[in-house]
Image (cartoon, rainbow, N blue to C red):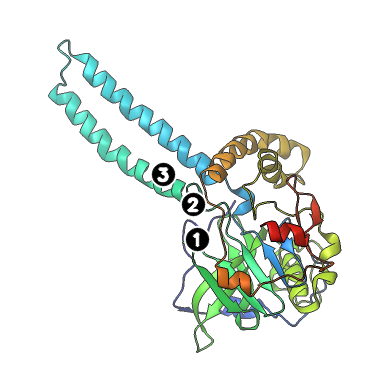
Amino acid sequence: MEFTGLVSKYPTKRQLTDAELALRLDQKICASLNPHYQLCVIKLNSTYLESVDKWFGWKGMISAVSIIVISMFSMLYFGLVHVALTREEGGGVSNEDLLVLIGAAVMIFPVLGVALWALRKESFSYTHYPMRFNRKTRMIHVFRTNGTVLSISWDKVFFTMGHLELWNEWEVRGHVLEPDSTTVSETFALSYIGSLHSSHSANAGVHSLPAKDFVRAHWEFIRRYMEDGPEAVSEQIQFCMPVDINREPFRGSIERIFANVAGAPFVIYWMLFPICSVVSLFRLFAMFTSKIPQWPDDLEANNQVDPSDPHAIRGAADGERIRDSAEFRTFK
């Protein structure tokens, strides 16, 4: 439930910090962790791994808050207008009521503007923002929130741990650096966000990581795919997000939201149940009003998959992992 990079931007045109340098994740160094895919996979094959963005798991939350705020404040203002119009017998508006309406507008309209701005960050935009990791060309392609694509060499990205102070959570960030190798020009994040539970976990070396460090375990999933190939990670994948061709189905939207709290204690799960139910409904709205992202034709031409690729998988309508056949790719 963290939206840095979507609502607020990652800071750029700055130097790498000491913490980022200390927590660097090297593409060539294997961590002492079992890799975890964390429901990130859209498609996987011997050519590329396509992942969802970090906001995908809680998509619907911004829309829920925004639409509820818009509804409440709109009803409040139109209620004031109704009272002002019906207070006087002649149907006019007194000077006192007019001042109240103007004052209310000054306070309410900026709130509505911010809520509409936030709503368009999630709804009326894109269903997701995929990342494609091509191990044959050793390139990363990131679908930006404005519809353009960042393409950068896997070996040139500076990966590091990023701390999200508001929720005390962590993520793996990829920094694109200027030629001086110290100035950050752009940042993207991998799809999983999680807690490390202790300060030791953040500073642990790659050979002494705790087993429940799922943040770096997710990094290890991406890293091993790029360095060791699909056979190193494919067996653990049970579900693939079915969003590359069609919008997420109704059942899939509900299941994806509740997957965020599936491991929570019983009491906490049922406390969050109403929230997840509401967010699920607004997730449907966000998906229905958004476009499915399309990679540029030249990029697709450089990401061809062998028709007989034994590792090619994608998601069925219910998210179950299925083979990505040559016939399906031809149909697409």
Q: Nearer the viewer, mark 2 or mark 3?
A: 2
- Which percent across, then down, holds residue 130? 61, 61
Task: Between residue 156 and residue 216, name the one nearer to us.
Answer: 156
- The quadrant holding residue 95 is top left
Residue 195 visible from this viewpoint:
no
Residue under label 3: 115
- Neighbourhood count class around disc 1 (C-alpha, 10 Å): few under 14, some 14–19, many 20 upward: some
* Amino acid type of the residue tagged 1 in the rendering: Thr
Q: What residue do we see at 55% from left, 56% from top? A: 166
Residue 126 visible from this viewpoint:
yes
CA–CA distance in space, label 2 to label 1: 8 Å
Which element carries disc 2, helix, strand or loop? Answer: loop
Q: What residue do we see at 21% from left, 34% from top? A: 102
- Neighbourhood count class around disc 3 (C-alpha, 10 Å): few under 14, some 14–19, many 20 upward: many
Which element carries disc 1, helix, strand or loop? Answer: loop
Task: Between residue 130 and residue 57, name the one nearer to us.
Answer: 130
Residue under label 2: 125
Task: Between residue 169 and residue 41, name the one nearer to us.
Answer: 41
Q: Is residue 133 above or below residue 146?
A: below
* Amino acid type of the residue tagged 2 in the rendering: Ser
**Where residue 145 is drawn, which disc sits there?**
1
Q: Is residue 185 left or right of residue 202?
A: left
